[in-house]
Image (cartoon, rainbow, N blue to C red):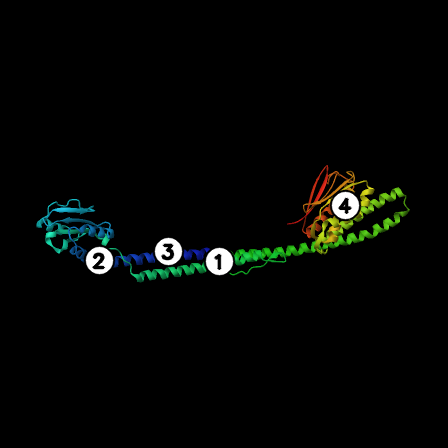
Amino acid sequence: MKKIANSLFFRFIVLIVIALGFLQTVMLLYLFSANFEKMKNNQLNLTQIEEKWTNDVKEATPDSIDKIVEKWHSRFEKSQYFYVDGQGELQKEWYIQIDESLPKIWDTMKTTRFIQEHYDAKLYTVIRFVGDKEENGFLVLQIPRDEVTPTKVDNSFIYIGGIFLILYLIISFIFFFKIIKRLVRLEKAMTVRENGLPVHTKIAKKDEIGKVEVAFNQMIDELEEAKEKQEEEEQLRKELIANLSHDLKTPLTKIRAASRDIPKENQHLIDQNIDKMSELIDNLMSYTLLTADKVTFELEENRIDRLVNQSIALWYPVFEESDFEVEVELEQTTWVVDDNQFSRVLDNVFQNVIRHADSGKYLGIFLKDNCLVIQDKGPGIEAHSENKGAGIGLNVIDLMTSKMSLSFKIESNQLGTKIMLKEKD
């Protein structure tokens, strides 16, 4: 039972019951007040109407009765009128709807019978002489009684109903405000981040929202535990790669020194593979340091065309030795980069061209419209090659350009590869 009483559904049902009770109470008060006031004020209203009609007709003339009729009809839309002159002839009728059998000639007997028939009838009837003179005839007013006995509600009952309504609104506002407050707190806990994870939320009550809060906190605990385990595994992986990269460097150096006594044709092959393995180790080490944010980038404005020219000057003998056709077209361009790291990006790109696009014998370097394009005419990235690796070098380039807010895009097919670098907007 306590569990049901703590639920939001139960509290919402209580609010609905209060609302229904409030409506019934106000309705009963209204009906009681209306009937009471109707009985109390019925005679008073009819008396006031009779006095007002008497005063208006007393000051009228046979020529002005039309204005009086229009004036009263504008106030009582269901009223009807007729005028009998001093000779007892029916002269005019206005808005006759209920009683269609009015005599054309009136005498004392017919007038008396008409008054008797309409005494306390459904049409409240008032007869008065025009100008208070018999020779001017009389003007008759007839109004349905339900129109002249309007219901009236005692102000005290209106005040009581208003108090009930205000109390209900206050209770409803407090109820929903607390719900909204708890939901906002839960939303804030979901959006606020500490160490990349949402924060715990306070459990206010053991209702439906409270159950969601408990489940949310349990989820945070599980995420924190999973993150700690992931960080431990990631740290172990990075340490393993770093140690492995360092340990492989030393035997490679010894192998290169020991290979000096081997015939030159075999020594060239050994040196080539040692260089390849050394490059892979360097890329692996760079990738590990970059992913661990161990590489420092000092970003400042640099002339990209000058940095590209410097790298080409260093690499040009290598391309010339391999019989590459080198085409260069550079516009003056300034980017915010780390000059040393940007030069490393260019070194990696040129090294890939030498290693994987030697068959095309072409290198094009173009810098215009704020975009650096380096392209070759090799077989493409997807082509099979003895020198093809796991692609970690491209991943290193991607990470380095991302650190310098540069976009890195590759287009490759069987006709060649195009690398595009551009400063992000």
Camera sees residue 283: yes
Whether residue 332 sits left or right of residue 175 in the image: it is right
Q: Which mark is residue 45?
A: 2
Please, is residue 374 above or below residue 49 in the view?
above
The image shows residue 169, relative to residue 99, as above or below, that is: below
* Residue 252 to residue 2: above or below: above
| Secondary structure beneath label 4 | helix
Type of amino acid under label 3 = Leu
Q: Which residue is mark 1?
A: 179
Q: In the rendered structure, are the residues bearing label 1 and label 4 in contact, judged by CB atoms less than 8 Å apart?
A: no
- First of labels 1, 2 by sequence position: 2
User: Disc 3 to disc 2, how far (Cα)?
Assistant: 35 Å
Q: Could you classify mark 2 by the number of other residues whose Cα lies within 10 Å: few (under 14), some (14-19), or many (20 or more)?
A: some
According to the image, label 4 marks what residue? 350
Residue 100 position, x and y percent, is 17, 44
Q: Earlier in the sequence, mark 3 or mark 2?
A: 3
